[in-house]
Image: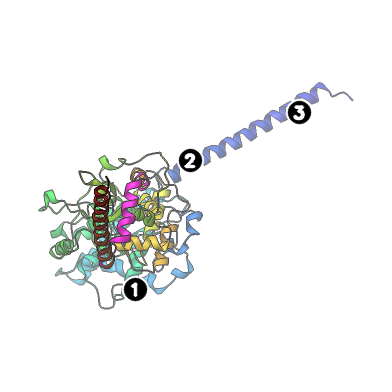
Amino acid sequence: METHPTEMSQGENYYEKDLKHLTSTIAGKISEGAEKAEYFFSSACIFRVPEDLRKLNERAYTPRLIAIGPLHREDEHLQTPLQHVKLSYTNYLLSRLTAGMKYPQELVEQTKLRVLQECLAEMKTSLDNAKKYYAEEVTLDEEMMLVDGCFILEFLYRCRTLEVPESDPIFCNSMTFYKVQNDLVLLENQIPFFVLEKLFRLTVDWIPNHRDENWSLTDYVRNCYRFWMAPRRNSNNSGSTKSTWCSVSDGVLMVLGSTTAVAAEEEEEEVVVVQTAAKYYHILHNLHDGYIPPLDQTNREKTSEIVVMPSASELAYAGVKFVPDALGNTLFNIKFIEPKGLFWWCRRACFIIPPLVIEDSTESYLRNLIALEQCCPGILQHVSSYAWLMDILVNSDKDIQVLEKAGVVINYLGTSEASALLSKLCKQCYIGNYFLDTGIKATQYSKRFWPKNLALLASTYFNSPWTFIAFCVGFIAFVISLVQFARDFGKNGECSCSGDP
């Protein structure tokens, strides 16, 4: 049966209309998707930790007591009376602005309301920009930003001044304080740093006692975590109060120098004030930025070569001596120094590594720093590289013992727990390693014949005073026997010669 030309033309028209409609629909979806991708990822810096990382240790990324921001707001285990403490802290912060004022109570309350109104106005204008900091669509409002931000500022202020009410449920309980302090540095538990800075300028900056000290928000953050962070001390400018932050101490990562010298400096200085104009995404980024070395050193050891470095015990067997960083200048002052000079053959190579303190909080803090590096574009992966290095060095309990004995690891956990911790930190991570050049040097050195055999000789005969004494006695006996043999051989030779005709 033949199709009428009119029917064919109508069919073509329907096809063209359907195709145009489909094209328009898909084009709209593409445009909408592109806009959402631009909206969520152009300035996103607060992420949910990827599932591959989270399943390795979910507790390391989950707040225990305090929810900050929208990502954990509805967690059931956080619906505790402690959440109301944030409102109490906000009230305390506003009250500090009028403390000591000899005004009628009505005027004091009006002042608090005026400041509160100014803060809410700033939060209202910042709301759309703040939402862009999250890598997903979130429910965020002015009240949430205000209360969470003021709670953090009051918490930091109390850490600085120790002006704490007797009934404070956080500072009067060491365990609660520790948990809250840890919650504030989780990647998923952040609010934008610019929100904190705006609230800081409207509140803390106007507290009478604060105005005399002229501290920045960064100063308060790093003072609060002064037992987690240690300042880089610049010997060329010892009189200056300015410094950069580059290491962690008393609880997480710690760059140890001379113990007595560091302790003396810490007694003299209550805290080192940090001056910086850097732009930070949030509190975790602020702390992370302190680890990064100067720009001229950032890529000094980055290489594309792949190397499988021996473990710590294998390197020690090959004649490598592990040495904790004596300068305490930077978390990444990792060097492999081969012996040089006339008597190089009787010296050991030195593997200099900033020490790592391993305790309960170490894994959570390191994991969140690493997650920040893995998720947030433009963040240098120095902490991941440091964790990679420690992972390579530690394959067994024996490796931990070698590093502990050398002072490179200060372990407050069991040997097996520490070994398991380091072996899991870099799983499911992409490492743009900055220490491969050091690993290559160590690997090449471990394959040399002379250092390995010299180290074997030293470990066998010079490992303790008794083995050294036994070696000396044996060596002396050997020399005496050799001399006696030569003397007897000489006499026998003379006798045989004298008997010849």
Q: Amino acid at mark 1?
A: Met
Res. 175 mark: 1
Question: Residue 316 in magenta?
Answer: no
Taking depth in this image into account, of 490 and 201 the one nearest to the observer is 490
The part of the chain drawn in magenta is 443-465
In the picture as drawn, the residue positioned furthest to the left comes out as 239
**301 or 45: nearer the eye?**
301
Camera-nearest label, 3 or 1:
1
- Let me know if residue 132 appears in the view: no
At x 28% / y 61%, what residue is drawn? 462
Position of the N terminus by quadrant: top right
Task: Give the percent coordinates (x, y) of residue 277.
Answer: 23, 47
- State the CA–CA distance, disc 2 to disc 3: 36 Å
> Which residue, given by chain and number where applicable, does mark 2 sit on?
35
Query: 94 above or below 133?
Result: below
Q: Earlier in the sequence, mark 3 or mark 1?
A: 3
Indicate the secondary structure of the residue bearing disc 3: helix
Where does residue 28 sit, x and y in percent of width and height? 56, 37
| Residue hosting label 3 | 11
